[in-house]
Image (cartoon, helix red, strand yellow):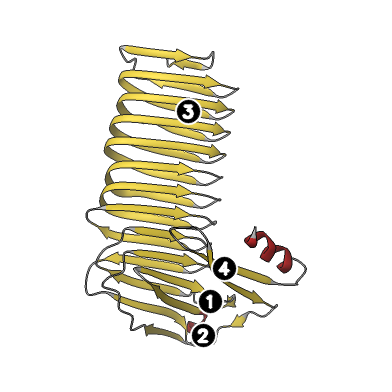
Amino acid sequence: MKTALFLALCLPLAACSIHVDHDEQSGDIKKVNISIGHSRTEGNGLNQSEARPLALDAVRAVSTTGGLDVDIRIGSPASLKVEGDSNLLKLVETELNGDKLIIRQVRGYDSDNELRVHLVLPQLARLENTGSGEVSVAGLAAGDLAVRMTGSGETRLAGKLAQLDAELIGSGDLVATELMPSSVKVAVLGSGDAQLGKQLLSHLDADVKGSGSISASGTAGTLRAAVLGSGDVQLRDLQANDATVELLGSGDVAVYAVQSVSATAKGSGDIVVYGKPAKQSLSGENARLAP
């Protein structure tokens, strides 16, 4: 309700941007940053790098806002560097809040040199991409990672993980074709796309609510896939021992089941099961085995 009020107050203005910080536990609003005006800053064309002296060793979470491109590498020593036109570096705010590093672009700019943040951290457990920029993470080696995307940006992941938990809200894309997790839970709640690439998984949980899509190949011990709306789940090239599939709407689901499948289709969309598993439970006229 409070966020809606801020938006309503902002709409009559010629130009306005709002950034809202929430409490991670309660979800309550802690701080609202409102930027008003037409102005964009013109870059001076003088490329420069600026190191930010922050205590980063305890950071486990990163949140990015705006159109910034952020490159994150897991390693040591921890460091943070902002690169771009020298007079634009001040447009990038970096703030520590507990174990979270917040990276924020406070105003638009015009320049041939994109503002970019280079970040090295010893670990990463949570990542939020709430803007239109590209965030890439390389060097992941262990542990779990939770990714939340709420804008139109792109997030790229590379390395190894025990568990990937990803939530896409909006039109942004997740590209994890160079990531090797043991288990994946991914939910697309908008028009974004999640590309998982070739995987060797113990379990994949794939949810689409909206018009987005999820794709993957490789193998999985168990698979649960659900589509509500017009989205697609394309897992024909992911051979799962056991698969459970639900479809409600006009979307399409393609899966490959080796041993067993339980599929329920309601609506105009199709579920197609490849692999001819020995145990089959198909419900709905649009749930069928591939010829």
Q: Give SS at disc 3.
A: strand
Q: Which numbered mark, 1 or 4, is in the foreground of this view?
A: 4
- Residue ID at (39%, 24%): 244
Q: Position of residue 113 (x, y in %)?
A: 49, 77
Task: Give the amino acid at mark 3.
Answer: Val
Task: Give the amino acid at mark 1.
Answer: Asp
Q: Position of residue 288 (x, y in %)?
A: 46, 15
- Residue ID at (24%, 67%): 122
Q: State the residue position of label 3.
A: 253
- Residue ID at (33%, 47%): 164
Q: Which numbered mark, 4 or 3, is in the foreground of this view?
A: 4
Mark closer to the chain start, 1 or 4: 4
Q: CA distance from mark 1 to mark 4?
A: 26 Å
Q: State the residue position of label 2.
A: 45
Crowding at mark 4 (Cα within 10 Å: few <14, some 14-19, many 20+): some
Mark closer to the chain start, 2 or 3: 2
Residues at circles 1 and 4 in contact by the CB criterion of under 8 Å: no
Mark closer to the chain start, 4 or 2: 4
Decide if residue 76 is on the left or right side of residue 6. Answer: left
Decide if residue 211 is on the left or right side of residue 236. Answer: right
